[in-house]
Image (tube, rainbow, N blue to C red):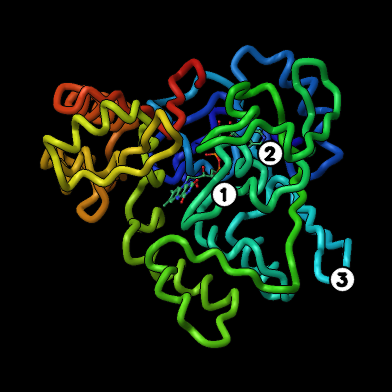
Amino acid sequence: MQCIDNADITQLNTFGVQAKAKKLWQVKSEQEFSELASRYQQTERPLLLGGGSNLLFEGDFDGEIFHIQTQGVEYSTVSQDQVEVRAQAGENWHQLVQQTLASGLSGLENLALIPGTVGAAPIQNIGAYGLELKDRLVTVETIDLKHNERLVFAQQDCQFGYRDSLFKQNLGRYLITAVTFKLSTRFSPVLNYAPLTELAQAKNLTAMDVFNCVVATRREKLPDPSQIGNAGSFFKNPIIASSHAEELKLQFPNMPIYPVDEHSTKVAAGWLIDQLGLKGFRDGDIGIHKKQALVLVNYGKGSGRALNELANSIIKKVYQQFAIELEKEVRIISDRGQ
Ligand SMILES: Cc1cc2nc3c(=O)[nH]c(=O)nc-3n(C[C@H](O)[C@H](O)[C@H](O)COP(=O)(O)OP(=O)(O)OC[C@H]3O[C@@H](n4cnc5c(N)ncnc54)[C@H](O)[C@@H]3O)c2cc1C
């Protein structure tokens, strides 16, 4: 592994906040994983890093970052119309989606244009437009960094939930080294979410059509991190007691709600923030995106600390108004770690 001391990590987080790390280890091959594991155990404040699209550095990080950059994708046919695709952790997620589609395999098209790496994708079970990673995943290969042993988790053992998994519950314990997906040569579209519902009437619909629709919608709705620093949705959509949701619905008839089960209901966090008139809020170089209240943005030299303070003030205001506690989806990395 190559190491950079006192490394500038401004380009390694999609918020683009200026920060440095005491050490930055570049992990480029599978052979380096055992060295990573032993170094990780000796380090007081280690941090695994993929594309840096789901974390916020509050400031300089007084620890050691292991930047996973391993590459490689393998295909193996498992039945007449099903193919398993095993991708290394450092592969770029969107490029994997493109590559599998170009190989005639459908299944990942709804998850197009989500930034980050393959290795980080199972952590929060990435999801968009009616599909979650768990719906296509077969196994997650890991190294248990506590016991320095290789473990392979089958899909049903990963405890996947909404933006949740066993790996998120034990953040920093498992290094994800590779992920295997089951994809299909026969296209079976998932079109439950707007605007994909409109494609249901289309003749000869292809996975590429769904991919193009998702990409166009995301480009229209979400700021491109290469233009405006952000980490996508900053908060999770809260799941609250259905009785609470019903009370709120009486007060706010336009409030969108999504029943989860008999007792609980999902509420749109963006809608709650929007009701407080905060969409488009700007204070110097930090703010809330003008089209999407769930997305906090860095217009240039905004600091991680200021962004986190803004997030905390949003949580407070939402609680005062709706008695709902928002939970951050983005991982906050202080100088001492996450
Ligand atoms: C514009 C934008 C849009 C987004 N849209 C979506 C969306 O639609 N749906 C969605 O679910 N998410 C979305 N995200 C969030 C983000 O893209 C995902 O969470 C992504 O999986 C993060 O990948 P990463 O490689 O950047 O992870 P990082 O930010 O580098 O790391 C995230 C966490 O995973 C850990 N980690 C990283 N790599 C590994 C590894 N190999 N093994 C173990 N732990 C690891 C890190 O320590 C950290 O805790 C969006 C982000 C942006 C900027």
Decide which of tag 3 and tag 2 comes sooner along the chain. 2
Which residue position holds label 2? 26
Image position, residue 128 (x, y; %): 48, 53
At a point 39% along the width and 31% down the height, the residue shown is 264
Badge 1: how crowded within 10 Å, few (<14), some, or many (20+)? many
Q: Which mark is residue 132?
A: 1
Q: Label 2: few (<14), some or many (≥20) within 10 Å? A: some
Closest to the camera, between mark 1 and mark 3, is 3
Asked whether, in this view, residue 181 is left or right of residue 93, the answer is right
In the structure shown, which secondary structural element does the residue marked by tag 1 occupy? strand
Q: How many marks?
A: 3
Residue type, label 3: Gln
Q: Quadrant of residue 51?
A: top right
Q: Is residue 327 visible?
A: yes
- Identify which residue, 231 or 27, lies in the foreground: 231
User: What is the quadrant of residue 30 in the picture?
Assistant: top right
Reading the image, the residue beneath label 3 is 80
Query: Eyeballing the image, is 137 above or below 19?
Result: below
Dot in front, 3 or 2: 3
In the rendered image, which quarter contains the N terminus?
top right
Determine the CA span between mark 1 and mark 3: 24 Å
* Image coords of residue 284 (percent x, y): 16, 40
Looking at the picture, which amino acid does disc 2 mark? Gln
- Residue 188, relative to residue 17: is it above or below? below
Cα distance, mark 1 to mark 2? 29 Å
- Residue 332, image x and y in percent? 43, 26
- The amino acid sitting under disc 1 is Glu
Q: CA distance from mark 3 to mark 2?
A: 39 Å
Q: Residue at x 47, y 30 (%)?
A: 20
Q: Position of residue 293 (x, y in %)?
A: 24, 46
Label 3 neighbourhood size at 10 Å, few (<14), some (14-19), many (20+)? Answer: few
